[in-house]
Image: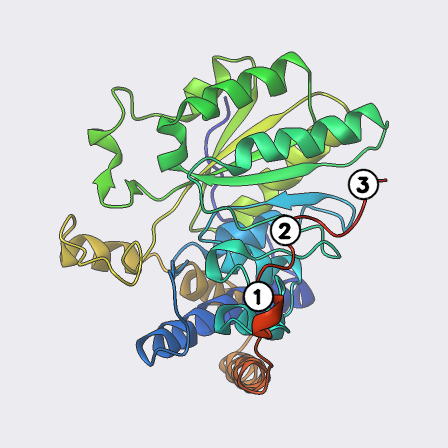
Amino acid sequence: MKNKTKQTAKVDRDHGLRLLRKMLLIRRFEAKSAELYSAMKIRGFLHLYDGEEAVAVGVMEALTPEDAVVATYREHGQALARGVSANAIMAEMYGKQEGCSRGRGGSMHLFDAAARFYGGNAIVGGGLPLALGFALADAMQGKKRVTCCFFGDGATAEGVFYESLNLAALWRLPVLFILENNLYAMGTAICYAHAVADIAPKAASHGVQTEIVDGMDVLAVEKGARRGAEFVREGNGPYFIECRTYRFRAHSMFDAELYRTRAEVEKWRKRDPIASFFDLCKEQAVLSDADMEELERDVAAEVDGAVAFAEAGTWEPVEDLTRYVYSEGRPR
């Protein structure tokens, strides 16, 4: 098992701009989503990703368009980083037909087959066996694809976590497991749910190659993900990365957040992955304050455009209410 990587790499300007813009888009998109939720434009559940942006953005740098991604219900960040359009995501949360799941899934069920983004899964740990299925199909067809599966530390208390690790290792399936360990399963601190709070060694006990990275450091995440994706793509079986991160907002919009102190949150905010990465880029003289201001304007325009797109979208006709309960297509 390898230890987490420190943020010491040199940053190329284009690379820096790309990483920073993606993280900024996720942060601003989610801030707008919270605002719209309070205004009752978005209904249902809403789980925000603030603070964890470096994980989704860093990992996606290591994947190809042919790879598959399976995520959790806190998946706006992964979807945006994967290239699902902000318009389609916002329309989905509005419940409009133009949404990526035709407005039927909402925040917790984002899905885009063209981007090979297969959820958005509302069940804790539910994405793990789905990822194994994608990976098994690729292995049986001889395709050198990676299935990347994001899940939280809450999922590691579920039996399906251990079953999935066991089968993936036994069958040497091409799965890149990405644990987003933000220290809380909803409102339960990890120390109250696990007799042994170190998760990566549990994966290693199944014979899976594992690594721990600083999930607040986008470059460390990218570096680890590239190692993992290469390992999987070369046919060596699964790879497990524990990204140690933190969410700045509450678990959901209904969470009174009584299980942690403001001081703890503020301590983690000092490690904000966006501010930290921008500071590094400035230290290396590859980005400036003017670049950040331009990125902010660009991202604001994209978010505003997504809201306008969703507002102008169309509602599903009542007569179509039961459509898609069963698939209208035949498997090939």
Q: Nearer the viewer, residue 9 or 199?
A: 199
Residue displayed at 51% across by 84% down = 293
Where, quadrant-wise, is the C terminus in this rendering?
top right
- Residue receiving disc 3: 331
User: Which numbered tag is attached to residue 60?
Assistant: 2
Q: Nearer the viewer, residue 31 or 200?
A: 31
Of labels 2 and 1, earlier in sequence is 1
> SS of the residue at dot 3?
loop
Q: Where residue 167 sits in the image (x, y, percent)?
A: 60, 17
Q: From where the camera sits, is residue 234 visible? A: no
Measure the alpha-carbon separation of dots 3 and 1. 35 Å
Q: Are marks 2 and 1 in contact (CB under 8 Å)?
A: yes
Where is 47 relative to 166, above or below?
below
Q: What amino acid type should be assigned to the residue bearing mark 1?
A: Lys
- Residue receiving disc 1: 22
Where is 296 relative to 228, above or below?
below
User: Which numbered tag is attached to residue 9?
Assistant: none
> SS of the residue at dot 2?
helix
